[in-house]
Image: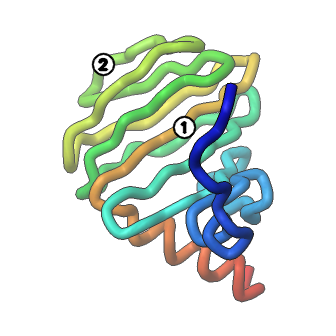
């Protein structure tokens, strides 16, 4: 295929592209770590969860879309269990209480938050500054 457009310069590329595995991981809970990418209106969290981990019930202002990339997880939303596996996507409105039980297989998910999760951005900043 013939390409008609010029390639982005290295400087242009570096302004727009992040190789998320190169972003230092942030511990969200014991056994749960994330590579975070955040911009003005969205935070994206690439999460790895160890087998049999439980997250505590919590809520946040940001709306959340969770995409299960691998493994299985029971997401508890407003007291009901939603069993999720690879390929499933669950949506969580703002301030809806949720928690999780990770299967014995572990789980990889991508969470998308809008507006950005400032608490997660602050944790990443601490890691980048070497405070944790």
Looking at the rendered structure, the secondary structure element under dot 2 is: strand
Give yes or no for contact between labels 1 and 2 (Cβ–Cβ under 8 Å).
Answer: no
Residue at 46%, 11% (x, y): give it: 83
Distance from label 1 to label 2 (Cα)?
21 Å
Q: Position of residue 104 (x, y in %)?
A: 74, 18
- Residue at x-position 57% and y-position 73%: 123
Residue at left 31%, top 62%? 41
Residue at horizontal 68%, vertical 75%? 11
Q: Secondary structure at mark 1?
A: strand
The quarter of the displayed image where residue 31 is located: top right
Whether residue 58 is visible, yes or no, is yes
Residue at the disc numbered 2: 80
The quadrant of the image that shows the C terminus is bottom right
Q: Quadrant of residue 64?
A: top left
Crowding at mark 2 (Cα within 10 Å: few <14, some 14-19, many 20+):
few
Mark found first going from the N terminus, 1 or 2: 2
**61 sits left or right of 109 in the view:** left
Count of marks, rendered view:
2
Does 120 sit left or right of 10 as displayed? Answer: left
Q: Is residue 68 above or below residue 27?
A: above
- Coordinates of residue 87 in the picture (x, y in percent): 53, 13
The residue labelled by disc 1 is: 110
Q: Is residue 27 visible?
A: no
Q: Is residue 112 above or below residue 125?
A: above
Along the viewing direction, whichever of 52 and 42 lies nearer the viewer: 42
């Amino acid at each position: 295929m013939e390409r008609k457009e010029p390639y982005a310069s290295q400087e242009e590329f570096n302004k727009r592209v992040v190789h998320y595995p190169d972003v230092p991981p942030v511990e969200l809970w014991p056994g749960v770590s994330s590579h975070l990418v955040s911009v003005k209106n969205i935070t994206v969290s690439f999460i790895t969860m160890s087998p049999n981990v439980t997250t505590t019930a919590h809520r946040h202002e940001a709306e959340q879309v969770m995409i299960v990339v691998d493994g299985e997880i029971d997401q508890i939303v407003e007291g009901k269990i939603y069993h999720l596996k690879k390929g499933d996507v669950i949506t969580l409105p703002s301030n809806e209480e949720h928690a999780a039980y990770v299967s014995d297989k572990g789980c990889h998910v991508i969470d998308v938050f809008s507006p950005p999760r400032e608490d997660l951005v602050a944790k990443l900043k601490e890691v980048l500054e070497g405070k944790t």
